[in-house]
Amino acid sequence: MLMCQDVATLASDYIDDELGPVKRLAIGAHLLMCRHCRSLIGNLRTTREIISQRSYDHLDGDYARRLDAAIGEALRHPDNGRTGPPKDPEAR
Ligand SMILES: [Zn+2]
């Protein structure tokens, strides 16, 4: 059984479809039971989509820097579960 920390570690490869079938299934099973990790995967997917749809090359430096800071802040926000162990009591 995977723990939330395992899912967090593998989340990027999971989204990129770079895991073998066993790990993929294990994560899928975990996601069925864990709202926290579903949120994590969903947020990561959304972030990937946004990044893949946007090129920052043409942006002026200040806008790109502020956008980068905002994304970094969103990723650090404890409620979205992107980093560290779950802080949501319901996810324990
Ligand atoms: Zn979990």
Image (spheres, rainbow, N blue to C red):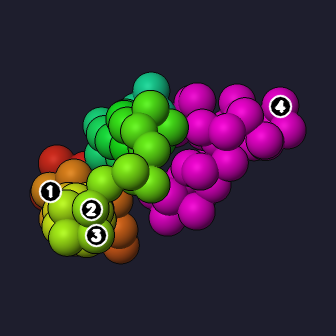
The secondary element bearing badge 3 is classed as helix
Magenta: main secondary structure equals helix
Where does label 3 land, which residue? 61
Q: Is mark 1 within 8 Å of ligand 1?
A: no
Tell me: 58 left or right of 65: right
Which amino acid lies under the numbered mark 3 shown in the image of this protein?
Gly
Residue at 41% from the left image edge and 39% from the top image edge: 54
Residue at the (83%, 31%) spot, across then down: 21
The answer to whether any part of residue 92 appears in the image is no
Q: Which of the two labelled residues, at mark 3 and mark 4, occupies the earlier sequence position?
A: 4
Q: Nearer the viewer, mark 3 or mark 1?
A: 3
Which residue is painted at 45% across and 54% down in the image? 57
Distance between mark 3 and mark 1 Cα atoms: 29 Å
Point out the tag, 1 or 4, that comes first from the N-terminus. Answer: 4
Viewer-nearest residue: 62 or 8: 62
Whether disc 3's CB lies below 8 Å from ligand 1 is answered no
What range of the chain is rendered magenta? 1-30
Q: Earlier in the sequence, mark 1 or mark 2?
A: 2
The residue nearer to you, when weighing 39 against 58, is 58
Instruction: State which quarter of the image contains the C terminus.
Output: bottom left
Q: Is residue 61 visible?
A: yes
Do labels 2 and 3 touch, CB within 8 Å?
Answer: yes
Q: Residues within 10 Å of mark 4 (few under 14, many from 20)?
A: few
Query: Which element type, helix, strand or loop, lies under badge 2?
Result: loop
